[in-house]
Amino acid sequence: MQSLGKTIHIPSDRTFVGHSRDLPPIASIKSGDTLELQLPNACDGQLTVESTAKDVANLDRNLANPTLGPIVVEGAKAGDALQVDILEIVLDDWAFTVQKSGGGLLTDLFPEPWIHIWRYEDNKGIFVDGISVPLEPSLVS
């Protein structure tokens, strides 16, 4: 779907953690506008491609799962149905999997902090040489 209006870019530094309807809007859009959202990773940048298990141990969980918003849709009223078209999802070239003491499903089996950095190549997540997972970007985690 082609944009009929203007394009608004919202950088990843406009995040908040938690949810509150009392937060001021970070943008206002009209029907037909396009939003470009630069989303931070799930740890809000606390981990990088060079991170180690020590960095995982020091993660601040209060910064986890940052969100962008709220965004006002001009003319929309409570109860209105809004159509949102996802035009494109662009991935970084890396991601991470972590295990932190006190969090996760298997902490009894893996009590020490752990991190694995995934490389993304040719629409695949490379775990280690010879082991990869096909990537199908989605908005769920």
Image: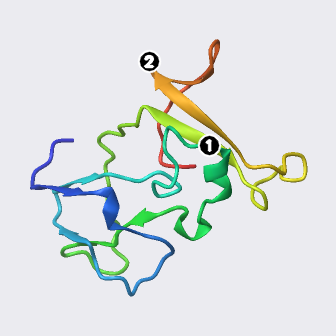
Residue 119 position (above or below residue 140): above
Residue at 33%, 57% (x, y): give it: 12
Q: In this view, does 71 lie to the left or right of 110?
A: left
The residue nearer to you, when weighing 122 against 88, is: 122
Q: Which amino acid does label 2 sit on?
A: Asp
Q: Position of residue 112 (x, y in %)?
A: 80, 49
Q: What residue type is labelled 1?
A: Thr
Q: Can you name the residue that lies furthest to the front here?
A: 54
Residue 122 falls in image quadrant:
top left
Q: Where is residue 76 in the image (x, y as percent from the top left)?
A: 25, 75
- Would you name the residue on which mark 1 appears? 52
Q: In this view, does 67 lie to the left or right of 28?
A: right
Residue 23 position (above or below residue 36): below
Q: In this view, does 93 lie to the left or right of 73?
A: right
Asked which colour scheme the image uses, the reply is: rainbow
Residue 69 falls in image quadrant:
bottom left
- Element at badge 2? loop
- Would you name the residue on which mark 2 appears? 122
- Element at badge 1? loop
Q: In which quarter of the image is the N terminus?
A: top left
Residue at 63%, 59% (x, y): give it: 58
Q: Answer few, some or many: residues within 10 Å of disc 2's Cα (few below 14, many 20 plus, some between 14 and 19).
A: few
Q: In this view, does 72 lie to the left or right of 130?
A: left
N-terminal label among 1 and 2:
1
Residue 22 falls in image quadrant:
bottom left
Q: Position of residue 54 (x, y in %)?
A: 66, 50
